[in-house]
Image (cartoon, rainbow, N blue to C red):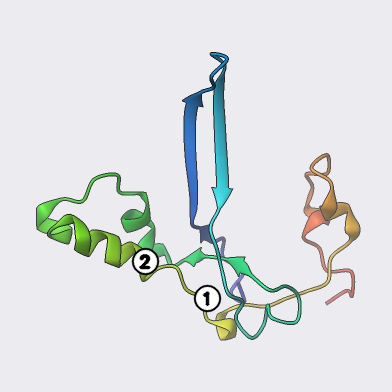
Amino acid sequence: MKNGEIFSMAGLYDTWITPGGEKLSTCTVITTEPNRLMEPIHNRMPVILRPADEALWLEREPSSHTHGNHPSHLQSLKELLRPYPAEEMQAVPVSTIVNSVKNDTEDCIRSITGS
């Protein structure tokens, strides 16, 4: 984000039992088409949630006083699956050390252009 704030991405998480009886936890990041900032970089981008939308995304069961019936809750969720406004984001080149999960330091997000 241009303002340097952290942000949330839409995703799904589940823990289930495999046919072999093993407990397995899985997760995925939900993606959408890229905005104009991301388009030159990749053909998709994560769905980034505004702070005001995080509770809606995380709500397991819609309550009648906040979302009405179930179909409207699903529609509200679908409306979150859009590109985040490019003008609120920035892109900076970073080192290739970001490509390994073994690297978990600030160097992963530090601009290599010095800006």
Which quadrant of the figure has residue 109? bottom right
* Residue that mark 1 sits on: 83
Check disc 2 and give the amino acid type: Lys
Classify mark 2: residues with Cα within 10 Å, few (<14), some (14-19) or many (20+). Answer: few
Compared with 11, 75 (above or below) is below
Classify mark 1: residues with Cα within 10 Å, few (<14), some (14-19) or many (20+). Answer: some
Q: Is residue 110 left or right of residue 39?
A: right
**Reading the chain from its start, which is encountered first: label 2 or label 1?**
2
* Residue that mark 2 sits on: 78
Please give the name of the residue rendered at 10% of the width and 54% of the height, measured from the top-left corner: 64
- Closer-to-camera residue (51/99): 99
Please give the name of the residue rendered at 68% of the width and 77% of the height, measured from the top-left corner: 38
Residue 23 x, y percent position in the rendering: 54, 19
Residue farthest toward the top in the current orientation of the protein: 21
Which quadrant of the figure has residue 33? bottom right
Q: Is residue 54 left or right of residue 69?
A: right
- Closer-to-camera residue (58/114): 58
- Closer-to-camera residue (4/19): 19
Mark 2 or 1, closer to the camera: 2
Please give the name of the residue rendered at 56% of the width and 42% of the height, measured from the top-left corner: 27
Which quadrant of the rendered structure holds the C terminus?
Answer: bottom right
Which quadrant of the rendered structure holds the N terminus?
Answer: bottom right
Residue farthest toward the front in the current orientation of the protein: 19
Compared with 50, 115 (above or below) is below
Residue 57 x, y percent position in the rendering: 37, 55
Check disc 1 and give the amino acid type: Pro
Count numbered badges in the picture: 2
